[in-house]
Amino acid sequence: MAMKIRLARGGSKKRPFYRIVAADSRMPRDGRFIEKLGTYNPLLPKDSEDRVKMDIERIQHWLAQGAQPTDRISRMLEAAGVIEKKQRANLKKAEPGKKAQERAAAKAEKAAAAAEEAAAE
């Protein structure tokens, strides 16, 4: 049985509240789970201690049994110091594409040439 430690959503519309659960990976997100391991309330401020509550001993037990945490849960566990930080892909989303970089380089070249001409005169 492939086990996951993941979030199960609760709460009403636009008022999310999540349970941290150990569940079979084949079960639906909000469906059957084996054990409740904690809670996560994203509406609370980030520095609030009630935002994320976890039963660390039970989470370590499930990790020892081979349960795989989801990305969001692994980030919470890293913040709590339960697991070591993973090296994640450093996406370069803010970098412009190839053509935009070429245009910017051409524009900079043109500006430098114009500045040289002005300095020579």
Image (spheres, helix red, strand yellow):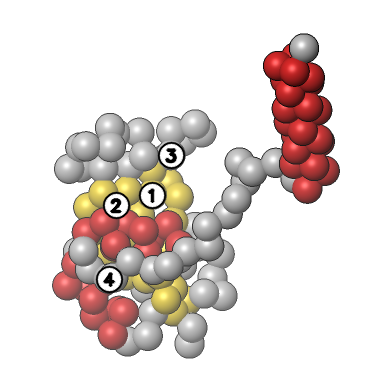
- What element does badge 2 sit on? strand
- What element does badge 1 sit on? strand
Residue for badge 3: 16
**Residue found 70% across the figure and 41% down from its top:** 96
The one nearer the camera, 15 or 59, is: 59
Amino acid on which the number 4 mark rests in the picture:
Ile
Residue for badge 4: 83
Residue for badge 1: 18
Residue 75 sits in quarter: bottom left
User: CA separation, marks 3 and 4?
Assistant: 26 Å
Earlier residue among tags 4 and 2: 2
**Residue found 28% across the figure and 85% down from its top:** 64
Residue 42: where, in percent of width, then height?
A: 36, 39
* Residue 75 visible in this rendered orientation of the protein: yes
**Neighbours of disc 2 within 10 Å: few (<14), some (14-19), many (20+):** many
Earlier residue among tags 4 and 1: 1
| Mark 2 touches mark 3? (CB < 8 Å) | no
Residue 77: where, in percent of width, then height?
A: 29, 62
Residue 43 sits in quarter: top left
The correct choice, above or below, for 100 with respect to 28 in the image is above
The correct choice, above or below, for 17 with respect to 78 in the image is above
User: CA separation, marks 2 and 3?
Assistant: 11 Å
| Mark 1 touches mark 2? (CB < 8 Å) | yes
| Mark 3 touches mark 1? (CB < 8 Å) | yes
Residue for badge 2: 39
User: CA separation, marks 4 and 1?
Assistant: 21 Å
Amino acid on which the number 2 mark rests in the picture:
Thr
Amino acid on which the number 1 mark rests in the picture:
Tyr
The one nearer the camera, 91 or 81, is: 91
- What element does badge 4 sit on? loop
